[in-house]
Image (cartoon, grey):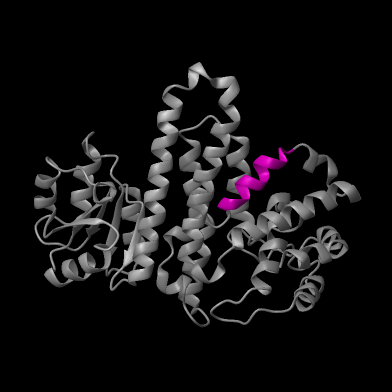
């Protein structure tokens, strides 16, 4: 029904951009177009939308100034804001995210990408509200409803991880597959009694859930780099590498507002260490050997295997046999030799997932 449609306010000082954006969104949402930050604030006294698309570069009051005011007011602080920008530097994007924006979309934007981003963010917000409402009454049903709460929290986590994955849209399904590959390796480690004590000290469910956040830092990387149909320049690759450190920063931010540490500790290690290499030539810290946490050494194998066996803008998909050959050849250089042995013993299970 019309009344059930989500409301979106689009703010841009360029009338052409407003018309284009409205035409893209009107089929799915109730759209209000606003030419300035000042007028947005006046409208919010009467209407509270489900999401705001906010241009950064506007005269008088720019997007950064506008979002500061939005986040300072209790009645508007909860409204999700996505920045629309023609800027391309990482510093500008990080500034916007630090001020409370949930995402960046580069102009000129792709209509399907804009619609998909909005859809996923609105889903996240709906689930967050459901979780909050649920937790308000949780003291009356803690024991019988704990499992349901965990499922809902994991659904939010999964949705957020899929949002990050969608930005890198050529790797669809990457997060789900890497979880399955990790599960195979963990079972193999316990069976072969390699690093068995450390693995058995982990909560396997927490570990596998936290693995979904290994690429969360990609939310700070520009679309033009994530989706580039070719080899990255040196400068672009340096920016791409920053997704590891930014991922750690994001997870540490979450840690500051929760008492749950083991789950997030796994996530932090996955995000920061999955591109380290056994011989010390990886990034971001150049760790080597067993100085690389075991979670990072595990993710290195499954991440590379999935990259090899799926098509990317810069390469075709390799067959399973070729991927196995490459991982085997990099045992002791890129990968932990003991973990490569576990992988080789179970590589047919990997192939079955493909």
Residue at x 18%, y 50% (from the top left corner)? 66
Question: Residue 76 lies in what quarter of the image?
Answer: top left
- Residue 293 part of the magenta segment: no
- Image height of 153 relative to 12, above or below: above
| Residue that sits furthest to the top in the current view | 140
Question: Residue 115 lies in what quarter of the image?
Answer: bottom left
Q: Kindly tell me whether residue 337 is visible in this rendering.
A: yes
Query: Horizontally, is 298 left or right of 131 in the view?
Result: right
Query: Of 298 and 160, which appears nearest the observer?
Result: 160
Which portion, as a residue range, is magenta? 202-213
Query: Horizontally, is 86 left or right of 188 in the view?
Result: left
Which quadrant is the C terminus positioned in? bottom right
Query: Horizontally, is 290 left or right of 145 in the view?
Result: right
Residue 40, percent from left and from top: 13, 50
Query: Of 16 and 119, which appears nearest the observer?
Result: 119
Residue at x 34%, y 60% (from the top left corner)? 104
Task: Please count the marks in the image.
Answer: 0
Residue 157, percent from left and from top: 52, 46
Residue at x 15%, y 62% (from the top left corner)? 58
Which SS does the magenta portion mostly show?
helix
Q: Kindly tell me whether residue 297 is visible in this rendering.
A: no
């Amino acid at each position: 029904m019309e009344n059930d449609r989500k409301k979106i306010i689009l703010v841009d000082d360029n009338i052409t951009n407003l018309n284009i954006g409205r035409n893209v969104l009107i089929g799915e949402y109730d759209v209000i177009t606003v030419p300035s930050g000042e007028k947005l604030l006046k409208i919010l006294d009467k209407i509270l939308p489900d999401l705001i698309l906010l241009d950064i570069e506007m005269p008088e009051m720019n997007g950064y100034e506008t979002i500061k005011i939005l986040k300072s007011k209790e009645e508007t602080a909860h409204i999700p804001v996505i920045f629309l920008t023609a800027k391309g530097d990482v510093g500008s994007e990080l500034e916007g995210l630090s001020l409370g924006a949930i995402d960046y979309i580069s102009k000129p934007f792709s209509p399907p990408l804009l619609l998909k981003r909005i859809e996923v963010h609105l889903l996240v917000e709906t689930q967050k509200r459901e979780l909050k409402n649920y937790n308000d009454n949780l003291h009356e049903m803690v024991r019988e409803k704990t499992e349901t709460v965990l499922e809902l929290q994991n659904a939010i986590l999964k949705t957020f991880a899929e949002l990050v994955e969608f930005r890198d849209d050529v790797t669809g399904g990457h997060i789900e597959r890497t979880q399955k590959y990790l599960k195979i390796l963990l079972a193999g480690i316990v069976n072969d009694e390699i690093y068995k004590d450390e693995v058995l000290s982990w909560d396997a469910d927490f570990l596998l859930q936290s693995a979904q956040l290994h690429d969360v830092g990609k939310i700070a990387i520009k679309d033009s780099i994530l989706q580039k149909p070719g080899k990255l320049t040196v400068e672009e690759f340096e920016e791409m590498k920053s997704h590891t450190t930014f991922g750690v920063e994001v997870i540490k931010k979450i840690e500051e507002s929760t008492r749950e540490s083991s789950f997030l500790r796994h996530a932090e290690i996955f995000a920061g260490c999955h591109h380290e290499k056994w011989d010390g030539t990886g990034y971001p810290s150049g760790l080597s050997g067993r100085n690389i946490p075991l979670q990072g050494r595990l993710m290195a194998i499954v991440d590379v295997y999935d990259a090899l066996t799926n098509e990317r803008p810069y390469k075709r998909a390799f067959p399973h046999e070729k991927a196995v050959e490459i991982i085997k050849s990099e045992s002791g250089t890129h990968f932990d030799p003991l973990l490569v042995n576990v992988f080789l013993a179970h590589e047919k299970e990997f192939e079955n997932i493909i």
